[in-house]
Image: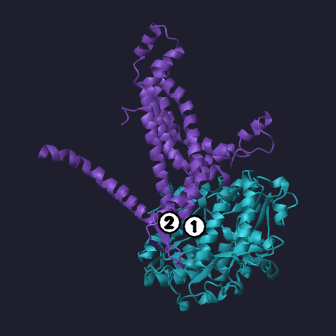
Chain colours: A purple, B cyan
Amino acid sequence: MKKISTPYLLLLPGFAFLFVFFILPIINLAQTSTQTRVVGGDVLEYEQTLRLANYLDAFIENREQFTRSFIYALIATVLALLISYPLAYALAFKAGKYKNILLVLVIAPFFTSFLLRTVAWKQILGEEGFVVPSLRTFGIISENTTLTSTSFAVVMGMTYNFLPFMTLPLFASIDRIDPRTLEASEDLYANGFTTFRRVTLPLSMPGVVAGTLLTFIPAAGDYVNAQILGNPNTKMIGNVIESRYFRIVDYPTAAALSFTLMAAILILVTLYIRKAGTEELV
Amino acid sequence: MANSPKSQALSQEARAILNSKFSRRALVAGAGALGGAALLTSCGSGDDAASGSGSVRWGNWPLYLDYDDESQLYPTLEAFMESTGITAEYFEDYNDNDEFFGKVQAQLKIKEDIGYDIVTPTDWMAARWIRLGYTQQFDKSNIPNAGNLLETLASPSYDPNREYTMTWQGIMGGFGWNAEKVPNGIRTLDELFAPANKGKIIVLTEMRDTIGVILLSQGVDLQTVTEDQFMNAVDFMEGKIKDGWIRGVKGNEYAEDLTAGDAVAVIGWSGDMFILKDEYDGKFDFAIPESGGTISGDNLVIPYTASAEAKVNAEKLINWYYDPAIAAEVAAYVNYVTPVKGAQAEMEKIDPDLAASEFIFPSEKTLANLSVFRSLTPAEESTWTEAFQKAAGN
């Protein structure tokens, strides 16, 4: 008896937390998502009509923002991977005694609010910042091109904001690789590229999968970057949900959109994990 | 609830950054609205109050009350506490009409204390509060100064006898611009959408101002605007967004875009532009469109969740701010249209230049060129807001 109950007791706080802060809100959200506005009623007056078509309407009306969210999240994830992999590799194998300091530097941005960092990007990429005038001096962008309020700025902001989520799991994975496996590869006459392709990359795959998931999932639902760095033509699904909830006071559509986003992410992630095969993750 | 998790995750200071009213003080700090974040503190412990006759909690827009940097106190509010013995707690957390409503509506619905005895919604939101029965009728015997309200503001359609609302400040909507980039200024919609401004134009998220200004330029009366006329104006805006003329539909943050040089022309608010003009030595300017601008007000409202005692204190507070001398002190700081008769004469004593300002004390001629957006039915409010939000990319 005692043997069985102890693990359950240990799980209790976690379950209780999830129940109150996840299960209950999800049930509430599900109920809200199928309600409709009372005809002739005031704002906030909804009735339960079990209207599943809310989902279809919400998706069709906002498919543009859905598509955009996933495309932006995908680009940001790929960019973050391309930036993070060499960084994590260098941290694991080449940093020597500076390893810990460099790791702290990777985490350092977390000491400041996400929002402040995004607002800072607005300043950096702004007309009065140093980036735009320098690029103009070198003729890389024209006099009339601006960087803020563009899809470029939104994707850059996302890449920057989620970079540590990519770097840390990658570092953890690469750091665990036994350097002797790389030596063995060289002994077998593999060149640097082959060693990377046949040894390093496969051994670091758990980090790649974890990093891409940790970047892609929050990026797809993000709305802060699009809000601060974008323009009306770069709005993401998070912005639509915010607008539906607060501005239009259309809670059912906001709820249906939230569920659709969750489902879409879940499907994509499942497909991805199947394809990538992550025994060590699950 | 069907809230987006991110928006709940945003901290208080984060919301302040996204939404805060632009201020002279924040500009001095050189960080735009960022400065406002640190100021979300309440004020006055009440230790020095004359006698302990209760308290009142006021939720107002950030940087919307005279503030003294050195003492970190609100002078007129301190004086109120000293004079009445009432402890006033002041919260600068009314950042956005929609957001604040979203935050407190669940408690209001079940009549649970929302933590404020006075809140400061804009006209249309005040109308919604009244409609939903979320407000308390004033006992005017506690507000003898109510008679000081300007006649032009005395009977709005949503509260014809001012039984539930008293104006805090009035806000004009019109054109703002960077005078270095747009030397000839902007008086018409065509001048706003001049080729040189393409991609550097921002309009307000407050649809009654943005669409109001567009409608007025199309010769539509805001008191009788129909759904077709409204949608036509929304289509106009949507076209300008799709074609890359408008770079953003924003709240107070448009001021940051102006100072950062990313925007050169806006549909904006008088008080913000007045402050920018002052701080940047005339680099920015504001004008009411030739075809007319909008005027709206933020209102002092007592939620029906306030206790009987708190309600009386709230009424005394309203009465305090309707004293012309006090109103002038506030106006000298916030630079919005003051609703109190006699404040202009009091302002002469503080700052004669400000007393002559059309932005704070608009003349009959100026007022004649400003329109109030008519009240919308709940159904219209939903459909029109939805159309506007969709045009803005949401």
- Say which of B225 and A271 sits in front: A271
Residue A39 in picture, x, y percent from top left? 53, 77
On the picture, is A64 further left or further right than B361? Answer: left
Residue type of the residue flagged with mark 1: Ile
Q: Is residue B158 visible?
A: yes
Secondary element under disc 2, as helix, strand or loop, is: helix
Q: Residues within 10 Å of mark 2 (few under 14, many from 20)?
A: many
| Host chain of mark 2 | A
The amino acid type, in three-letter code, at marker 2 is Tyr
* Residue A248 tag number: 1
Residue at numbered disc 2: A251
Front residue of B168 and A122 = A122
Instruction: From the top left corner, tell me how far across and down residue A101 is, in percent.
Output: 48, 30
The foreground one among A19 and B10 is: A19
Taking the view exactly as shown, the residue that stands out farthest to the bottom is B141
A272 left or right of B345? left
Q: Chain for mark 1?
A: A
Residues beneath discs 2 and 1 located on the same chain: yes
Residue A236: mark in rendering:
none
- Residue B91 visible from this viewpoint: no
